Amino acid sequence: MVAKLPNPDALPEFEPVWDRMQQRKARLLKEIMEAANADIGLQELEEDAQVRAFLAMGANAFGYVVADGRRGRHDTRYDQRERSAHERTDELPSNWVQVLGIMLSMIRDWRRR
């Protein structure tokens, strides 16, 4: 998670990160969290005020979030700067109709998350 110093009229949602940056006279703050157990992943991120502030800053173009993980057997990556998620798949069939079916299934799964 990366936060860049916003203008002085920061939004209230930024406060946990914004206050910390102001106290330390920082213009940039980066935080890296790595799960102790990759099979379980990070827990209770939604309850973390710092994470919510980083997300709010990213949503308002004052930073961004990058995440790597696994969903089943496949690696996934999210980069807020790209506003898209990336997911690796098993080898795709040579038939375009089957490839299209796989892609549609992945998109439906992604939209349900």
Image: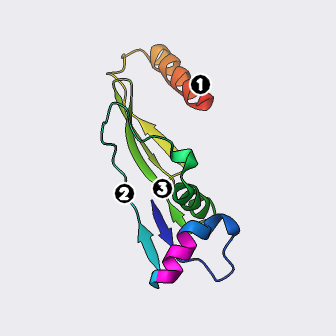
The majority secondary structure of the magenta stretch comes to helix
Q: Amino acid at mark 2?
A: Ile
Residue 64 is left or right of residue 68, and the answer is right
Distance Cα–Cα, label 3 vs label 1 = 23 Å
Res 86 quadrant in image = top left
Magenta-drawn segment:
17-23
Residue 59 is left or right of residue 29, and the answer is right
Determine crowd level at label 3: few under 14, some 14-19, many 20+ residues with C-alpha closer than 10 A.
Answer: many
Distance Cα–Cα, label 2 vs label 1 = 30 Å
What element does badge 2 sit on?
A: loop
Which residue corresponds to the image point at 55% horizontal and 30% vertical from the top-left? 110
23 or 99: which is nearer to us? 23
Q: Is residue 75 above or below residue 6?
A: above
Pair 2/1: label in front:
2
Which residue corresponds to the image point at 61% horizontal and 60% vertical from the top-left? 56
Determine crowd level at label 2: few under 14, some 14-19, many 20+ residues with C-alpha closer than 10 A.
Answer: few
Q: Which residue is mark 3?
A: 65
Whichever of callouts 2 and 3 sits on the residue coming sooner in the sequence is 2
71 or 84: which is nearer to us? 71
Residue 83: image location, x then y, percent: 55, 50
Whichever of callouts 3 and 1 sits on the residue coming sooner in the sequence is 3
Residue 78: image location, x then y, percent: 46, 45
Q: Is residue 47 above or below residue 73?
A: below
Whether residue 3 appears in magenta in the rendering, the answer is no
Pair 3/1: label in front:
3
Determine crowd level at label 1: few under 14, some 14-19, many 20+ residues with C-alpha closer than 10 A.
Answer: few
Q: Quadrant of the N terminus?
A: bottom left
Q: Amino acid at mark 3?
A: Val
Which residue corresponds to the image point at 50% horizontal and 57% vertical from the top-left? 81
Q: Which residue is mark 1?
A: 108
47 or 84: which is nearer to us? 47
Q: Which residue is mark 2?
A: 32
